[in-house]
Image (cartoon, rainbow, N blue to C red):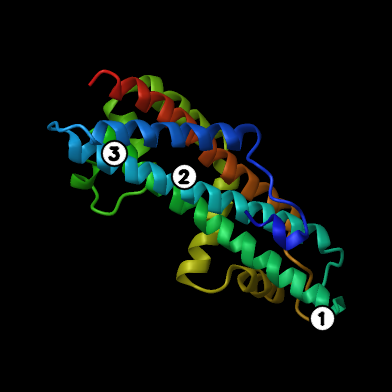
Amino acid sequence: MLQFMFQQPEQPPTGKYAEVDQLLEKFAMQMERRSSKADDNKEKWTKFEIWTLGLQASLRELYASHYAAQKFREKIVLNSIKEMDAEQKLDYARYVYFDKNGFIRVFSLLDKLGTFLNALLELKTEKIKAHFSYFTVLRTMRERQVHVKLTKPLNELKELSKEPTHRLRKRRNTETHYMNSEMHDDLIQRTRMYGQELVLENLDQQMNDLAVGLDLAMQSIKLTFEYAQTLVHRN
């Protein structure tokens, strides 16, 4: 979606991303066909169709943000903003923008998936916590020991990405509740390295964390919608 920014032609989705995108497209079409029939579940099928298309759009936006952040990261070769010229500073600012856009979207996408899961499995998590997250839904599934064939692999994915996800969440919380996340890194450095030149945050780790967040989202969606297909076929 953002290839034009780097003078590259638009390319069709490939690999795991393409597989998940097509899975969402297929499920949305199935829900559209079901909602066109006059039955007692018409409203539910329509809701699932709209939510699925929303997830598809959000995944595309996250994928594009990761792509752009990676491209701008490749342009950054200096370790200090003071050493950069105006063009290099602009590339860094663009990297920060798309990286930030990416890690915020990771949790936004997962929470939309949690809303879908909660309705699909009829968990009624909102009775426990009015404003729940994807991780709250996953905990509810574990505690109730329901839909084990889905709960187990989703939980394994969560555990495998635990440390990068924790860092992403910390940066998201800092960004949304306290200050700009990149400025928070400056604050830490200034309190620890008084009088020394500030260096950039660990951009490679940030890009790796964002890649893990994207992969967590894609794989969680894939598992959820493969399971969703088996459920709706019973109805």
Reading the image, the residue beneath label 2 is 56
User: Where 90 falls versus 147 (above or below)?
Assistant: below
Residue 179 at what x, y percent from top left?
53, 74
From the viewer's perspective, is 156 left or right of 233?
A: right
The amino acid type, in three-letter code, at marker 3 is Asn
Reading the image, the residue beneath label 1 is 86
Q: Badge 2 local density, few (<14 within 10 Å), some, or many (20+)?
A: many
Q: Residue at x 63, y 40 (%)?
A: 13
User: Where 77 falls versus 129 (above or below)?
Assistant: below
Q: Is residue 203 visible?
A: yes
Q: For the residues marked 2 and 3, what is the alpha-carbon distance in whole angstroms?
A: 18 Å
The amino acid type, in three-letter code, at marker 1 is Ala
> Looking at the image, is mark 1 or mark 3 earlier in the sequence?
1
From the viewer's perspective, is 124 left or right of 60?
A: left
Residue 49, quarter of picture: top left
Residue 112 at what x, y percent from top left?
38, 47
Reading the image, the residue beneath label 3 is 118
Mark 1 and mark 2 in contact? Answer it, CB < 8 Å.
no
Q: Badge 3 local density, few (<14 within 10 Å), some, or many (20+)?
A: many
At numbered mark 2, what does the secondary structure look like: helix, strand or loop? helix
At numbered mark 1, what does the secondary structure look like: helix, strand or loop? helix
